[in-house]
Amino acid sequence: MRVLLVDDEVEYVSTLAERLSFRGFEAQWVSSANEALESIGKNHFDIAVLDVKMPKMGGIELKKKIEEIAPGMKFIYLTGHGSEDDYNKGVTDGVYYLIKPVDIDQLITFMNQAMPNANS
């Protein structure tokens, strides 16, 4: 399973990508929505893990743009500043929603549920 992690907290997202790689996932990370769109234009990913609150463009808006260029991709939202409104938007979008710090086993469970036929 190819995973794109998008979070403006560089140390956090790079560590998360490393932990997923140790578990057998092909994990790539970027620290902005623009970098994510550029990377998706060049690479295939099965699932994107998006920080809801990022400067310039948050995960909810980014998801809409990704869906235009990569239909079929699955999504998980992450937030350290979650509001009830953000949670409701995520649930309405039919994506998984996790609060930071993320339990890696819970993230992997959600990834496997989102992509039940993918191999890690």
Image (tube, rainbow, N blue to C red):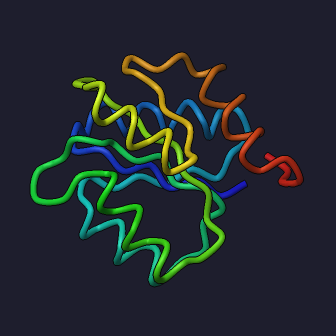
Quadrant containing the N terminus is: bottom right
Q: Residue 72, percent across and down?
A: 66, 70
| Residue at x 66% of width, y 62% of height | 46
Q: Residue 117, percent across and down?
A: 89, 53
Query: In the displayed structure, does residue 112 sit left or right of residue 76?
Result: right
Q: Residue 73, percent across and down?
A: 61, 65
Look at the picture and state if 24 lies above or below 28.
above
Query: In the displayed structure, does residue 51 sit left or right of residue 70?
Result: left
Look at the picture and state if 29 lies above or below 52.
below
| Residue at x 37% of width, y 20% of height | 100
Foreground pick, 91 / 49 = 91
Residue lying at the far right in this picture: please name it: 117
Q: Residue 119, percent across and down?
A: 85, 50
Instruction: Count all numbered tags in the image, as a single digit.
Output: 0
Query: In the displayed structure, does residue 21 sit left or right of residue 42?
Result: right
Foreground pick, 34 / 53 = 53
Residue lying at the far left in this picture: please name it: 56
| Residue at x 68% of width, y 45% of height | 25
| Quadrant housing residue 14 | top left
